[in-house]
Image (spheres, helix red, strand yellow):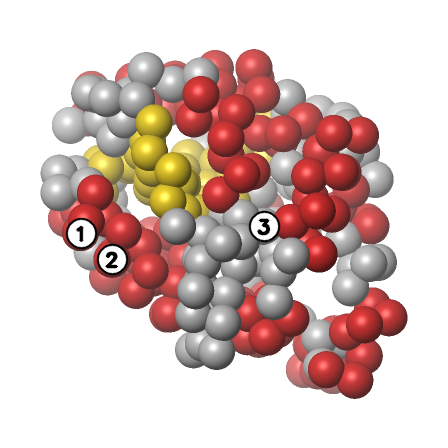
Amino acid sequence: MATVEGDGGIPLLFVHEISGDRTHWAETQHGLATRSVAFDLRGLGESGGGHGPFGVEAAVEDVAAVADALLPEKFVLVGHGFGGAVAGAFASYYPERLAGLLYVEPVGDLRRLPKSDVDAWLENFSEAKYGGFHEHWLVPLLLKAKEHTRALVMKSLRTSRREAIAGNMESLVGYNPDEAFERFKGPTHALVADTGPETLVAQRPSLTHSVLPNASHWPMLDSPQWFHTELVRFLGHCKHEH
């Protein structure tokens, strides 16, 4: 399921977060003059594919399918959270297809975490535990969120399939973010609210980034105007490089 807006310019393709859907990009798309596409990853939002497979690799296949159908030319790939890992993986496989790579609140290399911590975290997404857990796991990320952000995020979480979230999360903890930097040499930037030690911008000092203070994990929802300004600035850089 995809939403296409605008026409002309360097096109954009948006990839949403692990528990989100394409509606998280709606306001961003409405404000753009350039062509943009947002879609629901398999098992999430209004997409099919409820039985998987899920994970970063499967989501890369979804991105490739959407790009093949709607974006035959080079495009800028924008990924939020888990979507950032998907965008990075796509960039490592198909660097020639991208005019730019924009991370939004990207997670760092989770392979660095102790295995016992990872196993305990993933257990929360099991069928036995998820029912009592799923309303709470995003709370820390929503502490600084605007009320409308919180409402939309929780709405999309409640319509997301547990199997998809669990499969994507399990894949994410094994994802290697270094490969994108090794293989894609075009314009790359990050828009973030958090710069803590477990984030990609902290682990990759060479990754240029813009910071939105006092915001949640969803900067495009908390501050659409700031996000629009930064996105248009990055598009200008991509156009110059292109």
For the residues labelled 2 and 1, the Cα–Cα distance comes to 5 Å
Q: Amino acid at mark 1?
A: Asp
The residue tagged 3 is 20
Is residue 114 among what the camera can see? no
Residue sitting at x 45%, y 58%:
47
Q: Amino acid at mark 3?
A: Gly
Q: Position of residue 165 (x, y in %)?
A: 60, 67
Residue sitting at x 71%, y 75%:
125
What is the quadrant of the C terminus in the image? top left
Kindly indicate whether the residue at mark 1 contacts the one at mark 2 (C-beta within 8 angstroms). yes
Vertical relation: 183 (above or below) 233: below
Label number found at residue 68: 1
The residue tagged 2 is 65
In this view of the protein, which residue sits in the foreground, 52 or 173?
Answer: 52
Vertical relation: 140 (above or below) 120: above
- Which image quadrant is residue 37 in? top left
Vertical relation: 126 (above or below) 211: below
Q: Position of residue 11 (x, y in %)?
A: 25, 30
- As helix, strand or loop, the secondary structure at mark 3 comes to loop
Q: Position of residue 208 (x, y in %)?
A: 45, 33
- Which image quadrant is residue 240 in? top left
Q: Residues within 10 Å of mark 2 (few under 14, many from 20)?
A: few
Q: Residues within 10 Å of mark 1 (few under 14, many from 20)?
A: few
Residue sitting at x 33%, y 34%:
4
Q: Position of residue 95 (x, y in %)?
A: 20, 51
- As helix, strand or loop, the secondary structure at mark 1 comes to helix
